[in-house]
Structures are given as structure tokens and as C-alpha cells.
Amino acid sequence: MIQRRAKSAERHNPGFYADVLTLALLLAWYSAGMTQPQRLEQKAGPAQTNAHTAAQQPMIMANGVSVASDFPHISVTTRENPAEGYIFINNWRDDGPYNIIFDDRGYPVWYMRTGYGDRRRDFKVQKNGVITMLTRSGPYRFLGFDSDFNQVDSYTAVDGYGTDEHELQVRADGAYYLIGIRSTTVDMSPYVSGGQKNAQVSESIVQGFSPGHQKIFQWKAWDHFDIRDVQMEDLRSGSIRFPHMNAIDFDSDGQLLLSSRHLSEITKIDLATGKIIWRLGGAHNQFKFINDPLNGFTSQHDIRAMGNGHYTLFDNGNLHQPPVSRAVEYALDLQNMTATLVWEYRNPPGSNYSYYMANAQRLANGNTLINWAIGDRPKATEVRPNGTVAYEMNFADQYHCYRAFRFPWNGRVARPYLIIEPYLNQVALIFNKFGDPDVRYYRIYADTHANATQLIDTSKTTLKLLSGFSNGVRYYFRVTAVDKNGLESEPSNEESLVINFTPAGQNMVRNGDFTQNNANWTFELQDTGQGSLQIINGTCRVQVDNPGPNIYDVQFRQNGLALTRGRAFLFEFDAWADQPRIIEAKVGQDNAPYINYSRIGLMAISNQKKHYQYTFTMTDPSDGNARVVFNCGKYNGSVTFDNVSLKEQIDSGVESESAEQQPERMVLMNYPNPFNAGTVLRFNLENSGGVELNVYDRIGRLVQTLAPGWLTAGAHEIKFEAQDLSSGVYFCRLAVSGRDGRPALRAAHKMILLR
């Protein structure tokens, strides 16, 4: 059992790792071929620009929160006294979606990474204080959390309707309303000429529930709307969305407000009777638009009641000519039946067309927070009533986002949240006990079985690099937090990983030359594919008897390979076939959606042995269980493979020479190393020669040329000044040529600059 009270944990040293992120840790990080785990600092000034790029590595942010390599950083371009509160947001991404609470500087104060395809959108604080988000894991439903992110509720549609992803509204008393959806077969021929007799119509409804989850209200589109009024849909097609309800709210008198995008209509509904009170916009508009140059809205999102007859919405404007998007506020006069445009914002005029999603939130200080939804457009533009911008940001990688909000948050989670990432010879643990200022340090537990209770290290920071594990073994990790009183929290979520440490430049593929028969390789047949795997004279022959209909129906592969995001890799193999044919060779994900990390397509091979090599950079999140896979189905002809190799490349393209290539007479070194502002490069020449001494950064760009020209035999020292360079790994390359100008000797050396 994990004890709740730590006993002198600071003095406890398991002898496994260092206590804190010290210089030794930084050097270990560099030795792994990785850049320093950064601490992004806050820049001074009210209009700070915090342009966080896709870092492709775990790091500790300036507020002490650590993030993983795939974290969706944001770029803050305007920050001039915005409203109080945090930005609640999600990134629209299948692999590695996050829900995040950001502060105004762009630093996360809470986040959750969810599984593939589980984009938990509509992340907001409800009127009763519950934090909700849609989850796509299993049947769609909304999850409810208290302010400390303990799950307290879930919300779903009933009576055969699925839970629609667009909206959940929880009232102050806990009653809630959401949108349901189901598809039915409809004969559309009576509605439109040429309509299909078996069209699939996705009908939206509104369902209301008591705080105890008893259904108390239901309002169906079929009962109140005419499907012939639908816009942006071909009523002659086999699939129709009717009417695409996308937002609900409650007016100041408690009655229901409904936005139906494909009607371009806002409808007010009597909750007691279900009767329509009024209709704004669309084919049955009852109001005259005043002071609106576009004469109303089209294809809108996010109706919200402001009180006193005022309403805001996001006008996507798909059907405006030309299309234009804006946040708008209307004042309705129910006696004269007018809708007066009293405020709008376009940023800048005409440029931010958002063809779907998006929202506008009126804040307590009178500003309006606008999410433009589309990738390259801002995800949060906070506008003052006079149209000036107080705050603006976007994802550095320009993800889409359904809705963004600003809310207060002062929660404190009960346990740390843990993410682990594999690297070639280390494991990075990223852990945070969000919202807790009283954490003194963290305790790290690991073992070869689940529910790990073996304490292996402590950390005063929220990011830790670990090594010393056995290859081929699955390890389980948990983290706890110890507060200033010595009380230990409940353990974090448990994460596990099969260790596969391979230094850069060495082959990660096990038994790639097949000298150990078929060890470490998996052969699989699917569909009607037939064949076998044969090891013949140290080569691997994929015998194809029936190729099957798909390229993957005859497959052999090896998994357990560690790929680090942002690193470059070289994939090589020999291949030939009984007859010319097509195969697929790639490095990719070992589970759905089977991402092709190497971006290699189908390739033609002949009956002549040929060496194939491909370089690629890992742009997806780090994967500790990637695979090399060869697909040999679909086409006739057996295929033979040999010398399969996958290596991480040296960062700069400057490879260190072997012992035979780097004799004692020309040793290249520098002192001190690591260094701060300058260092001295030292080398010996046995004979006089022409010397080229160049310094490169970690991606191979020339930084500085030192001491070019002819040097005599003997020891030499050259000073390298680095005052204008940033911290990082640098490579020095020395080349010596004789009088004929031909290169005679070469050497390369890695240096570390630490500020």
C-alpha cells in the first residue's frame, strides 16, 4: 500500500536518480539527443506576445506546469487588460485531443488529454457550477465535474435518441436540457420532386430533465418545422440533417430559445405547452431587421439571451453574399416586431469567415469573447463594446475549435495527472497536481506489475527523466504529491510502457538481418490471404500463395520501437521479388488508426535485389510502441527482405567518427563542456595541413567558421565565443586536407551551451 504520510522523503534517496532537475539532468537530456526541457518565461508588458510554437518535447511552463510533447500550445498576440477568468478550450484533433484551461499568458493551469477520436468539446461551466464536456468515448454523452474535476454526473438523451454533440444547458437548480438526434428512413418524394423514397433523415429534438434525470420535456422538429424549409441540404440526397439544432438557452422569462442552423432560425418555445412564441430569421421570420446591412443572420450558432430583449449569436453567414461571419447583438421589440442590430464585430471586416462551429460569449465586464473556430483564425478574440481588442490568441498549430469560453476557476485536484513519453534511452514523466499551491514535492512509483508501490524517486519539479530500466520489460508508473505538512495525495492515474532503449545511430529493429531465424517478427494473414514466412540463408522470404484483395492481407511486422516526436529517422532494407510487383513498407502506429509515421507510399520492386532507404521526421506524438511493417498482399509474387534497419539520425548530420577514423593524433575536444559564454577547442595535428573548423547547430545549420587556413603540426587551441547563441547542443566539425587539397582526416565533437 502507498502510505498517506511521507517519512523524511527529501532525505530518502533510492540511489536510482537525481532529486531535482539539476545540471546533471540537463546533461542526461542532451545525451539522449534531446533539447533541454524548457521553462517558458513570461514576458513583461501588458501587450505580451507569447508565441509558443509546437515544441515537440515535454517542458515545464513558466507557471510550473509541465506539458507533453504533443501539447497544443497557444500564441497570445494581444493582452491588454482583458476580463478576469481563464480560457476554457479544446483542440480539434483526433490523435491527442486536449481540453485545457489557459491563463491569459498562454500557460495551462489544468488540462486533460483524451484518447484517439475523443474530442471532448463544448467545455464550459454551467449555471449550477458544474463543469461539463462532451465525450465521444462510447456512446456520446456529456460528463459533469465539480470544480476539482471529480466526475459528479453524466447527461444523455433517452427514448431511442442519441446525445447530439452540440449543446447541453444545466440550469441553476440542476435541471438540464440537451439536443437529441436519431436517423429515420423517410420517403422524401412527397416533399420535393426527385426526393428519394428511402432517405436517411437525421432529426434533432430537445429533451429536458429534472435534476434527478426524469424526462420532463420533449420538442420534436417533425412536429413543428417543415423539412422543405431546410437550407444548405440537398433534399434529393440520401442523407439529410433536419434541422441541425445547434444551441439552446433560456430567455429572461425562463422560456426556451433554440437555434436551428439549417433553417437560419432562432425559435422561442413555451416550455409548458411546446408552442412557438416567436420565430426570428429563416423562411418564417416574424421580425423586420433594423440597422443591419446584411438584413439578418444565416447558418448561425450560439444563441444567448442577454436580458431586456437583447440576444447575441454568432452569425456564420454561409448564405450571405459574399459569405461573412460576425458576432452580433439584436434588440427585439415585440410590439413593433423589429430586430435592431445594436452591436456587431468582424475581425477585420470580411476576413474571418467561419463556415461552421464558432461562438460568442458576453462577459461580465461587457466585453465579448469570440471564437472564430477555423484553424488559422483566432480561437479567442475578446472585444470591448467599442470594437477594440483586449485579448487575442490562437493555437500555434492552428487547430479548429468548436467553442471557447472565459470562466473563473479555483479548483484543486485530488491527485496528480500523469503522462509518460518514451525516448531512446530515457522515459519522461509529466505530472501535475493542478490548482494546488501547497505541493512540496512528488513521489514516483514504478514496478513491473500494475498498482506500482515501489518508490524509485522524488521530484521537486513536475517533469522527470528516468533511465536504468531493462529493455523489453513493461513498467508501470504512478505519482503522488506530498504537501507542506507531509501528507501524501492519492496516486495519479497509472501509465505503463514497454522499455526499448536504443542509442541514436543504432538499429532499433531486433533481428533485422534474420540471423536469429524469425525471432521478434510477427507474420499475419487476413481475408483470403495465404502464405508463409521462411528464413532462407539469412534472408526473410514472404511466400505469397494467395495475395488476398488487400495490400495488408499478407503482412509481417515488428513493434516495440520508440519514436520521439521531432526527431529524424532513417529506415532501410533490401528487397526483391519473384516477379515485378507492388509492396508497402512503412514505419507506423501499432494500433488504430495505424498512422503512417514515415509517410511512405506503395512502392514497386523487381526481381533484382535493391537497397531502399527513406528518411522521415516524426511529426506525430512520441510513440513507444511503433512498428515496422511490410505489406505483401493484393499482388502476386513472393518477396524477400534483408538488412531491415531503423535508426535515429544524428541531429546535425555531423556524425562522430569511429575509433579507426579518429586516431589519437587528431583528437578534437573542448573545455569547459558544458560551457556558458565561451569555450576552447583543442586538437592535435601530426602533420601540417589545411584546416576547416566549423560549428553547426543541432539541425545542421552553420553557426560559425573558426581558424580556416593552413596550420602546422602540433597542438592547437581555438577559442569559440557564443555570447549571441542560445542554449542547446552544437557540433564542431574538423576537416584536415593535405597539400593536394584532398581531405585526409576528419573529426566531430558535440558541445553543450548552457545559459
Image (cartoon, rainbow, N blue to C red):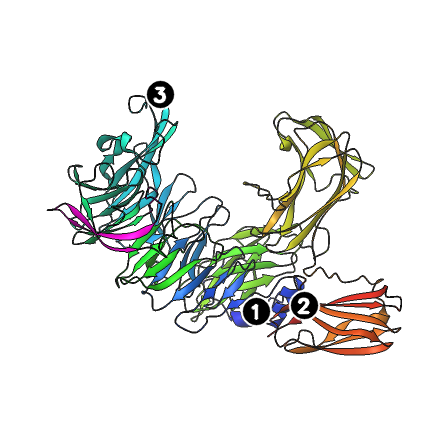
Q: Nearer the viewer, mark 2 or mark 1?
A: 2
What kind of residue is marked 2?
A: Tyr
How far apart are the two marked residues, 1 and 3, measured between alpha carbons?
68 Å
Q: Quadrant of residue 521?
A: top right
Question: Is 269 displayed left or right of 743 in the figure?
Answer: left
Q: Nearer the viewer, residue 352 or 97?
A: 352
Query: Which circle marks residue 730 in the picture?
Result: 2
Say whether residue 109 is visible.
yes
The span picked out in magenta is: 316-345
Q: Earlier in the sequence, mark 2 or mark 1?
A: 1
Q: Nearer the viewer, residue 506 or 567?
A: 567
Q: Which residue is mark 3?
A: 197
Where does label 1 land, which residue? 21
Is residue 251 depicted above or below 736 in this figure? Answer: above
Q: CA distance from mark 3 to mark 2?
A: 69 Å
Q: Quadrant of the C terminus?
A: bottom right
Return the x and y of residue 396 as percentages of the image width and height.
Answer: 48, 57
Answer few, some or many: residues within 10 Å of disc 3's Cα (few below 14, many 20 plus, some between 14 and 19).
Answer: some
Q: Earlier in the sequence, mark 3 or mark 2?
A: 3
**Mark toward the start of the polypeptide (1 vs 3):** 1
Dot 2, crowdedness within 10 Å: few (<14), some or many (≥20)?
Answer: many
